[in-house]
Structure formats: structure tokens, C-alpha cells
Image (cartoon, rainbow, N blue to C red):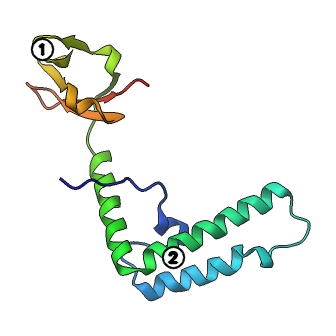
Amino acid sequence: MADFNIPQKDWYSILGANPTDDIQDIKQKYQKLILMFHPDKQKPGLSEGEAEQLLQKFIDVDQAWKILSDEKSRKEYNLQMRACELKQSWPVDAHVTLDDMNWDTDAECYTYSCRCGGEFVLYQEDTQEAETVVCCDSCSLSIEVQKVT
């Protein structure tokens, strides 16, 4: 299974673009924004905080262009975004922590009772992620288990 790093920023929204935009549309949006946020184009007398925010926007716009202008990195980024969407779109009925679950020594897994009478089962090897979605063994309900750090 592919190991996807979940993107931290939405490069498309930073440029005001969509994944379906062609490279020329993205380039035009980039050029407009890079001029708008360029440090040399800023008004004198900006507070340090405002200058810092504009510089960060400039850096983000530049980084977005570097990722989206290269066909290979754009495809990889689109795959990461899709993986993130699929992970986030799972319907979750409750949020629990690992501490809320019961450890079953014999089966070497965590269990949590479902309202239908079934159980949510989480095996030790699946506890590495900060958050894991677990389905009930009897019905269609699911819970998100958060690892306590």
C-alpha cells in the first residue's frame, strides 16, 4: 500500500485555482499573486506583523507554483489530496480515545462496545496512527479512535 504524506497546505486554494485548471490558468493566477505579495511591492509603513503575513503569502504562492507547475509533483500532490479526501470522508459516529477502550489480553487488541451490541476492535499494530477509524463488527457504525499522547 502506498505511503501518502498528507499535504499540510492546499496549494490550489493558495493560488485561487482548481485541480481542473490547465497550467496556463494556474500560471496567470500565480503571476498576479506573486506580484501582489512581493516584498518590493509593499507599501512603506506596514507593521512588522503585516509585513510578515505578506511575506508568508509570497512564500506560499511561490511554493504552490513550484509544486503545481511541475507535472510530476502536481500528480503526486493530487494523489495526496485524494487520499486525504478519502480518509476524511469516512462517516464517523463517535470519537473516543485509546484510553476509553478496553485492552483484551488474550486477543491482544482493544475493544469498545457498540450501541448495537457489537464491538469495535482495534489491533495493537493499528494503533501507530494518531487517529484511526474502526468499524463495528456487527453494524455499519464507525468510530474514530484517537491516540493519547
> Label 2 crowding class (10 Å Cα cut-off): few <14, some 14-19, many 20+?
many
- Which quarter of the picture shows residue 74? bottom left
- The disc at residue 65 is 2
Q: What residue is pinned by disc 1?
A: 117
Residue at (54%, 86%) from the top-left corner? 28
Question: Which residue is drawn at the image coordinates 11% and 18% (left, top)?
Answer: 118
- Tell me, for residue 143, which label it has, or none: none
Horizontal arrangement in the rendering, residue 80 relative to residue 59 (left or right): left
N-terminal-most mark, 1 or 2: 2
Count of numbered tags: 2
Q: Residue at x 90, y 71 (%)?
A: 44
Q: Which element carries disc 1, helix, strand or loop? A: loop
Going by the image, does 94 lie left or right of 137? right
Residue 92, placed above or below residue 137? below
SS for dot 2 = helix
Q: Is residue 12 above or below residue 113?
A: below
Type of the residue with mark 1: Gly
Callout 2 amino acid:
Trp
* Residue 80 screen position, x and y as percent: 33, 60
Residue 48 location, quadrant? bottom right
Q: Position of residue 88 (x, y in %)?
A: 32, 46
Residue occupying the far right of the picture: 45
Any part of residue 16 in sight: no
Going by the image, does 64 lie left or right of 89? right
What is the x, y in percent for residue 13? 50, 66
| Mark 1: few/some/many CA within 10 Å (<14, 14-19, 20+) | few
Question: Is residue 131 left or right of 2 when viewed as pictured?
Answer: right
Q: Residue furthest left?
A: 138
